[in-house]
Amino acid sequence: EKTDVVAWIRSSAAKATWVTSHCWGAFMLCQAGLCDKKAVTTFPGYYKELSEAFPKIGSVIKDNRIVKDGNLVTSNGGVAAYEAANYVVMKHFGVNRAKTVATGLVFSADNYQAMVSAHDAQYVPTPTSSAVARSVALVVVPLVSNLLMAALA
């Protein structure tokens, strides 16, 4: 249930430029009603459970580790959580900053860029420059995304 947490997620998301979740975090975002009619992903092996528990989800994507639908970014968790957080860095601060972060986290910025480019084309167009220019506010389930954004501020 966690009604206080769900209420906080819902109210924070209403003010957020980006809303992210990783691993099981999609379940919390769904409880807050943030995934209705959206494409999302979750920890591998729990796709069916997520879609059955929350039938208002647009679709649960199984073959992408990071899924973006509007301002909602979800990932499978694990290493994909770092990549998804860096995806938000790329959208807000640009490719060069994201490559610097990727290098610091010791994953290939080149492979990451190719994956994100293919993903954007498949699901949602890239946000306009005015959307990227707005300040970032995140609803983040894992602490890693929050710490990453705080380090870049």
Image: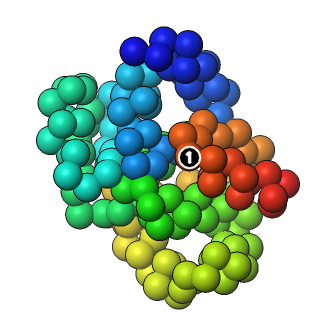
Farthest residue in the top direction?
A: 3
Q: Is residue 9 left or right of residue 64?
A: right
Regarding residue 126, the answer to whether it shows in the image is no
Q: Residues within 10 Å of mark 1 (few under 14, many from 20)?
A: some
- Reply above or below: 17 against 81: above
Counting from the top left corner in percent of width and height, residue 47 is at 21, 46
Which residue: 71% across, 58% down?
A: 148
Counting from the top left corner in percent of width and height, residue 39 is at 31, 44
Q: Is residue 3 left or right of residue 40?
A: right
Counting from the top left corner in percent of width and height, residue 20 is at 53, 44
- Reply above or below: 86 against 17: below
Q: Pick the quarter of the image with the C terminus.
A: bottom right
- Reply above or below: 87 against 134: below
Is 45 in front, or is 135?
Answer: 45
Q: List the residue tagged with mark 1.
A: 142
Disc 1 is placed on an element classified as: loop
Which residue: 65% across, 40% down?
A: 138
Which residue: 58% across, 58% down?
A: 85
- Colour mode of the rendering: rainbow
Counting from the top left corner in percent of width and height, residue 18 is at 60, 43
Is 140 in front, or is 11?
Answer: 140
Q: Pick the quarter of the image with the N terminus.
A: top left
The mark tally for this picture is 1
Regarding residue 151, the answer to whether it shows in the image is yes
Indicate the quadrant where residue 127 lies. bottom right
Which residue: 40% across, 49% down?
A: 23
- Reply above or below: 77 against 10: below
Residue type at mark 1 is: Pro
